[in-house]
Each structure stands twice: as C-alpha cells, then as structure tokens.
Image (tube, rainbow, N blue to C red):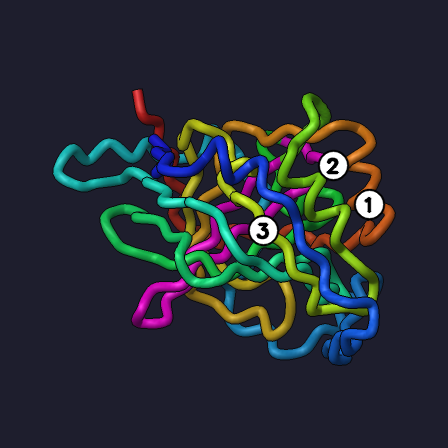
Amino acid sequence: MIRFHRACMPACLALLALALPSGAPAAPVAPHFDYRHQDQWQEIHGDMQSPIAIDSSLAQADRDDDDDDRIVLHHVGGDATAVDTGHAVQVNMAPGDSANIRGRRFGLQQFHFHAPSEHSIDGRSYPLEGHFVYKARNGRLAVIAVLFEEGAPNAAAALVLLHFQPGRSDVALRLDPAALLPSTADYYHYLGSLTTPPLSQNVEWYVLTSKGSMSAAQIAGFKARYDGNNRARQALNGRPLLHFADN
C-alpha cells in the first residue's frame, strides 16, 4: 500500500502560496508538437509505448511474497514552481519528496496533468490524469499515474490553479503533493514510454486503481488551461501487465 511520511501533512496543506513579482521573465518557448497530428510526432522508438488501454482481464496478479511490491511515499511538501510547458500544467518540485517503489528509491521531479485521461481502465476514460514523475540516481524514470474523477475539492489542486500563469515558468508556491494522491496503492504496472516527444522508452508506469478527487470547478479549471493534451492509446504488444493489490 501507499504510505505517507506524515511529519508535516496537516501543516503542508495549509501553507500559503508565494507568487513571484509580476515583472518576472516569461517562460522559455517549449518545443512544439500538435496533439491533433500525433502521427507526425518524431522520435517514436520501438513497440513499448504509452499510454495504454488497461484491460483488467489481461492483468497478471503480482503476488510474489519474496518481493517488496509496495509504493511507499515520503512526501513532506515544500517549495515548488508552477510551469506552463506549452503543453500542460506542470509543477516542478524542489528536492526532498521521494518514494520507495518496489524497494528502490526515487526522487519526485515534477507532476503535470492531461485532459482527458491518457490511460483508461476497462474501457473507461476519466476527465483528468496526473503524472507524478520520479527519477532514481541511475536516471531511471518511474511515473505514478492518478486518474481523477469529479468529487470533493482538492486543496493542492486549488493552489496549482491559483498560481499557474500562462506563458510563465517561474511562479513559486508551496504545497504538499501527497494531497493529490489516493491513500491506497493498488496499481497496474507495465513498462512503457514518455507520452510526449521524444517518447523515450523503458519508463516504469504505475497506474493507481484508486481515483483522485477534484471538484467539477477544479476539473474545468485544468481543462480551461489545457484540454485535449492526451496522447492516443498505444498497443500493448505482448508486454506483461501486472496488477498489485495490497490485501
């Protein structure tokens, strides 16, 4: 299961966000790619691409008692930067937040959002998907994907929406990313790729089965910034799809 380091979780949710002065420099121009013409994207390598349509009937139960299959998050929150990448709402995190994923340590680099969801589960898509990108010391990437549905408002989402400014990559805020992650960690796992160019492979994907919650207004707020920034689902091509359930 997902376990949080809760040293400051209540306080982190109450931290006030700090915006930089309005005269701060604009964001650098991001490489351009068009979601309406994904067939023209370059540097597609191999047959292990993401996202995928998850079919639970094809998933193999991951029940090797000799392995540590848990995701244990150590999120204490802190300094972050709201970034307009030109393709998504993104938050870059200062060093400090990390996760033990299947027994290995990864540091949280950033998280960002796609609307509608890039992954689906048993044919169901969701209005929003968050990608929490972690990196190990050896450079290996692991992405925890959270599918969001309409429900209770989310305090961290409110901070992101408040401080995201189109064309800016330098708006400072403080938040606890744990508030955006479900408290349980059943997940689907497969090896895939980045979902934006250069579409690099050998990325570990962990799609949580528990859903995140945002209010209708918050979901609409993310869609107002970027909508339709979801890559088409890719063929599984015989890759193993594992399902870990902590019960």
Q: Amino acid at mark 1?
A: Lys
Q: Residue at x 50, y 31 (%)?
A: 182
- Pinpoint residue 193: horizontal percent, then vertical percent: 51, 62
| Residue position for label 2 | 127
Q: Which residue is mark 3?
A: 174
Give the residue type that dot 2 points to. Pro
Residue on which disc 1 sits: 223
Instruction: Determine whether label 1 and label 2 are within 8 Å by CB.
Output: yes
Per the model, the C-alpha gap separating discs 3 and 2 is 26 Å
The answer to whether the residue labelled 3 contacts the one labelled 2, judged by CB atoms less than 8 Å apart, is no
| 86 over 239 or under it: above or below | below
Q: Nearer the viewer, mark 1 or mark 2?
A: 1
Of the pair 193 and 128, the residue shown nearer to us: 128
Asked if the magenta segment contains residue 216, the reply would be no
Q: Residues within 10 Å of mark 1 (few under 14, many from 20)?
A: many
Segment colored magenta:
123-147
Q: Secondary structure at mark 2?
A: loop
